[in-house]
Image: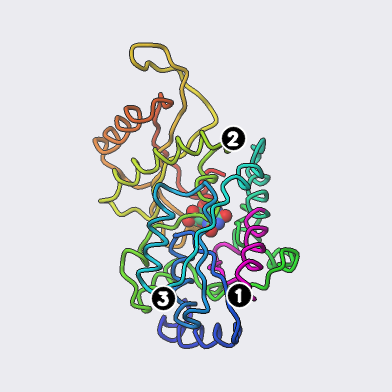
């Protein structure tokens, strides 16, 4: 970060105030560190004229709508949850190519935000896009869900006027701003969570049933890995199957990958060196609690050549 966090806030808060004027703004808040810090920064600038919007798209982690909305409200941020899972599953139906999936997500995401802006009579959408999101999208690595104008898509297409207070920052800078805002460590040190949520961790078609499997596995992986405080850890559902034995019978089941990486800015990453016994424990719990899973793998790949997520 070029600016110290205090100086960044000194410039960013009045700027948001000026940009929003006397109007109302929405902030799309998925619960990852960028969107949370962005929501609190915007709240500092415009108070009750900010509405934090949690889009409940059916692709979030267990209890996430409750946890995120409770955290925001506890800190005085006006928050609404929009249940729109059906729209997202409809948009993703039949899609298996990662970029097709990402573009379908992005389009549904901004359509939903367009509707929300009209519903709440807001004039602006404030979003937590950061420098790495733009870099990876422009570099054609993957189309991040929250990059539009930088790749020539006019937000007015969705009826939106967008403010992006964090675009000059990378992840460590965002965390420093969160800390300088006086937020609890549990917020500014939260793991990154991608906007398209669990859809980035389902290889192949994203269906409610497949998301349920990866959601349950994610909760087990997160809880088993918690004490190592990795940069990011989660489960992935592969589009392949493997023969296994469940309750003494042959089962051609699903394959879950445990992914855990260490990184500073998500542009490069290394797999977490997890003790074998910990991996074993997680594998046992996944196979025991998720009947559809017959095989669990650990991903050893750094970024590059891999990326952190799977689509
Ligand atoms: P990859 O998979 O490209 O991820 O190595 C780098 C970082 O970006 C997150 N990520 C996203 N974040 N919208 C987001 O807000 C997206 O579309 C998206 N795709 C990946 C990922 O979780 C990691 O922290």
Snapshot quadrant of residue 181? bottom left
* Mark toward the start of the polypeptide (1 vs 2): 1
Q: How many marks?
A: 3
Please indicate, yes or no, whether residue 249 appears anywhere in the rendered image. Answer: yes
As displayed, is residue 105 above or below residue 179? above
* Contact check, label 1 and label 2, Cβ < 8 Å: no
C-alpha gap between disc 2 and disc 3: 37 Å
List the residue tagged with mark 2: 204
Q: Residues within 10 Å of mark 3 (few under 14, many from 20)?
A: many
Q: Are marks 2 and 3 in contact (CB under 8 Å)?
A: no
Q: Quadrant of residue 6?
A: bottom left
Report which residue position mark 1 lands on: 163
Q: In front of the other: label 1 or label 2?
A: 1
| Magenta region | 108-134
Assess whether residue 119 is covered by the magenta stretch: yes
Task: Name the residue rendered at 32%, 27% in the picture.
Answer: 288
Question: Which comes sooner in the sequence, label 1 or label 3?
Answer: 1
Disc assigned to residue 183: none
Question: Does 82 sit above or below residue 295?
Answer: below
């Amino acid at each position: 970060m070029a600016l110290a966090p205090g100086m960044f806030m000194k410039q960013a808060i009045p700027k948001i105030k000026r940009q929003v004027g006397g109007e109302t703004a929405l902030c799309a808040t998925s619960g990852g560190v960028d969107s949370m810090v962005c929501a609190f920064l915007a709240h500092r600038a415009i108070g009750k004229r900010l509405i934090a919007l949690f889009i409940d798209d059916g692709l979030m982690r267990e209890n996430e709508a409750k946890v995120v909305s409770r955290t925001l409200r506890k800190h005085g941020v006006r928050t609404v949850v929009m249940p729109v899972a059906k729209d997202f599953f409809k948009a993703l139906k039949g899609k298996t190519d990662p970029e097709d999936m990402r573009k379908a997500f992005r389009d549904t995401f901004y359509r939903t935000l367009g509707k929300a802006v009209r519903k709440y009579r807001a004039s602006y959408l404030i979003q937590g896009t950061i420098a790495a999101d733009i870099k990876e999208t422009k570099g054609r690595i993957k189309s991040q869900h929250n990059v539009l104008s930088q790749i020539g898509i006019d937000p007015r297409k969705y009826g939106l006027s967008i403010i992006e207070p964090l675009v000059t920052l990378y992840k460590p800078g965002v965390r420093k701003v969160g800390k300088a805002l006086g937020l609890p460590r549990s917020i500014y040190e939260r793991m990154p969570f991608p906007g398209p949520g669990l859809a980035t961790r389902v290889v192949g078609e994203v269906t409610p049933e497949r998301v349920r499997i990866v959601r349950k596995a994610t909760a087990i992986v997160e809880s088993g890995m918690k004490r190592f405080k990795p940069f990011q850890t989660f489960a992935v559902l592969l589009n392949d199957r493997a023969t296994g034995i469940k309750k003494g019978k042959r089962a051609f089941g699903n394959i879950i990958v445990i992914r855990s990486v260490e990184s500073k800015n998500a542009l490069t990453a290394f797999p977490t060196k997890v003790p074998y016994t910990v991996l074993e424990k997680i594998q046992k719990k996944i196979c025991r609690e998720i009947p559809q899973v017959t095989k669990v793998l650990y991903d050893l790949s750094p970024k590059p050549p891999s990326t952190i997520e799977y689509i």
